[in-house]
Amino acid sequence: MQDPAATKNVDKRLWFAIMTVFFFLLAGSGAGLAAVNMTDKEIEIAVEEELRQDQAVASYLVDIACTKGIVTLTGSVDNLLAKDRALAIAETVKGVRSVINRIAVNPLQAKSDEDIQMDVVQSLLTDPVTELFEIDVTVDDKVVTLKGKADSHIERQHTGRVAKSVNGVKEVKNRIILDYKTSRSDEDLANDIAQALRWDTLVDDALIRISVNNGKVDLKGTVGSAAEKRRAVNHAWLPGIKEVDAQMLTVGRWARDRDLRHEKYVPKSDDQIKDAVDKAILYDPRVLSTKVETQVDNGEVTLTGRVNYLSAKKAAAQDAKNTVGVIRVKNQIKVTPVPSAENGSEVEQKILNKFRRDTYVENLEITVTVLSGIVNLYGTVDTYYEKTRAEDLASEVAGVYAVNNSINVNKDWEPFVYKPYVDESYVPDYEWYSYQPSVTARKSDREIADNIENELFWSPFVDSDSVTVIVDDGKATLTGKVDSWSEYDAATQNALEGGAVVVDNELTISGRNQ
């Protein structure tokens, strides 16, 4: 049960939201009405554009249809991760209420069921999250079935993603059951879910109502995008939860309103931010450590302590970045040396084996060398996404303390744009990433400005009404006000998607001195 006072506040915000959309309808003009009146065809075009710009989905093979805000994806891709990514990208487009994913998967590599089964088992045994799980894997006509137990829904989901990443897999049936080692009261669970939503920069929680009864969660109310709804549901699956029902959590385009976010982005104390970051890291199975320590100074987070994998260090930093009130993250976490140190050739082979099994990296010509736990990657790939994925896979191997990624990218004129709700790591954080397109803009300044404004409008994450765009000789200058550093970064990515040669982000952040 939720606190009565908290429920009363939610009801007030719901009443305010109803009045807000009523005002938009009466106004007869402006961005509010434009958002309400966007057509299905406009949504289709926006989804098509988002998929076209993504480096991990072959968008020319995907067809999009939209009816009353419900998007249906058909066509085909060559791997399950691309199918899931297409759905996640479609959910991020403003106006999309839900997505029906009917994309077929036709793997490029012909593998026997026995080989697929062996590769899935090995991938689970060498993944930092799933290595200790007892998972039964069967394969029938390239369809993988997973059975076993997991401690949380997040771990169950992650197990499914690992299986989906194996080349040759056509479908994954995840029948892993949850086996909680502790039980908690419904009240504690409801409070923790509310806190998780409140502190996540990617969810506007003002209109979400939460109730927990005997471990079953009911989410009701309204969010601004289908991507927010999915993220809210994932937050609700805390350890101890048996079921989540979000049928009454609807998607309303009008719900992405600055006034509804006012309470979320009031200034927070460093102690409050620290507590929120600590909880986010604690519930993230990718971090796999209670030895991460957090210090906060005027919104700047410093992470110290030890983890067992480089990938865990990166995950902890991303958890901190997605926390309300955080303005910067210094990641000083150390990776613990493996007790029985393996020589470089053994680590190299483990990395190469991961590359061979992976649906994106399998056919890439990448050379790996390891010296004292430092991995060096060489070779040539087509996209920044492939370069990023190779580094991420290497960071999941025990004994890897750092990665020097010297892989060349053929299509280096195309930016790998970070997508909130879709990407688990922030691409510009990679040391090698410095997207530098041609100095001469291929489009006129007016065209680039129009494209950027269009990207901002269709984003479910940036309030386009609060951002002013000026383009001069391909350089985009953004001014105005946003609510969080996550929104600030997302606006930069929208400008790159719009074709900006350089982005000067001068947006100010509410409640913070710049």
Image (cartoon, grey):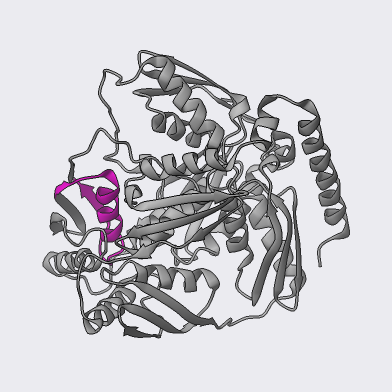
Report the magenta residues as a range. Answer: 379-405
Residue 424's x, y, as percent? 43, 53
Q: Residue at x 19, y 55 (%)?
A: 375
Res. 111 image quadrant: bottom left
| Residue 301 placement, left or right of 396 | right
Q: Does the image show residue 421?
A: no
| Residue 395 placement, left or right of 381 | right
**Residue 402 painted magenta:** yes
Name the image quarter holding the C terminus: top right
Camera-side residue of 197 and 383: 383
Residue 493's x, y, as percent? 43, 35
Q: Residue at x 32, y 63 (%)?
A: 79
| Residue 217 placement, left or right of 136 | right
Camera-side residue of 493 and 250: 250
Res. 298 image quadrant: top right
Residue 510's x, y, as percent? 64, 30
**Residue 119 painted magenta:** no
